[in-house]
């Protein structure tokens, strides 16, 4: 197996989507909370704050940045 065939196999793998449990978000628990760590970490602006957090699954590139910055573990993937 050469590197090219390995790369082709890796790109063919399905990547699990990022899932959001919005009820775990700090903002869902406290309307005066100012946490926006996930929104700032997202490189493709797939996260929106409209009183609570929302994930645009079409825009999400499954980079995992939000997974590591969320203090409540609202993201899974």
Image: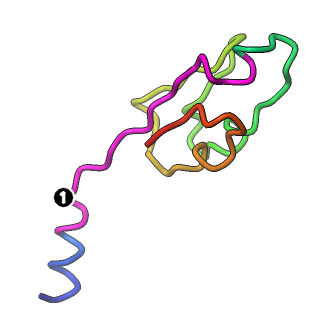
Q: Residues within 10 Å of mark 1 (few under 14, many from 20)?
A: few
- Coloration of the structure image: rainbow
Of residues 48 and 25, the one drawn nearer to the viewer in this rendering: 25
Identify the residue at the far left of this view: 1
> Residue at 62% across / 23% down in the picture?
24
Position of residue 60 relative to residue 12, above or below, is above
> Residue at 61% across / 37% down in the picture?
73
Rendered-image quadrant of the N terminus? bottom left
Position of residue 42 relative to residue 35, above or below, is below
> Residue at 15% across / 78% down in the picture?
5
Verify whether residue 68 appears in magenta: no
Say how many tags the image has.
Answer: 1
**Is label 1 in a helix, a strand or a loop?**
helix
Magenta residues, as a range?
9-27
Q: Is residue 52 left or right of residue 9?
A: right
Q: Is residue 6 left or right of residue 35?
A: left
Of residues 66 and 43, the one drawn nearer to the viewer in this rendering: 66
Could you say where residue 53 lies in the image, as x and y percent from the top left? Answer: 63, 20
Q: Is residue 4 left or right of residue 16?
A: left
Could you say where residue 76 lies in the image, as x and y percent from the top left? Answer: 48, 38
Of residues 21 and 6, the one drawn nearer to the viewer in this rendering: 21
Q: Which residue is mark 1?
A: 12
Could you say where residue 37 lies in the image, as x and y percent from the top left? Answer: 75, 39
Question: Quadrant location of residue 12?
Answer: bottom left
Question: Quadrant location of residue 40?
Answer: top right
> Residue at 46% across / 38% down in the picture?
60
Rendered-image quadrant of the C terminus? top left
Verify whether residue 25 appears in magenta: yes
């Amino acid at each position: 197996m050469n590197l090219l065939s390995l790369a082709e196999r890796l790109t063919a793998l399905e990547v699990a989507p990022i899932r959001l449990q919005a009820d775990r978000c700090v903002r869902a628990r406290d309307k005066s909370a100012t946490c926006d760590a996930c929104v700032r970490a997202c490189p493709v602006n797939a996260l929106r704050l409209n009183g609570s957090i929302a994930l645009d699954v079409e825009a999400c590139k499954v980079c995992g940045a939000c997974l590591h910055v969320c203090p409540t573990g609202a993201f899974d993937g």
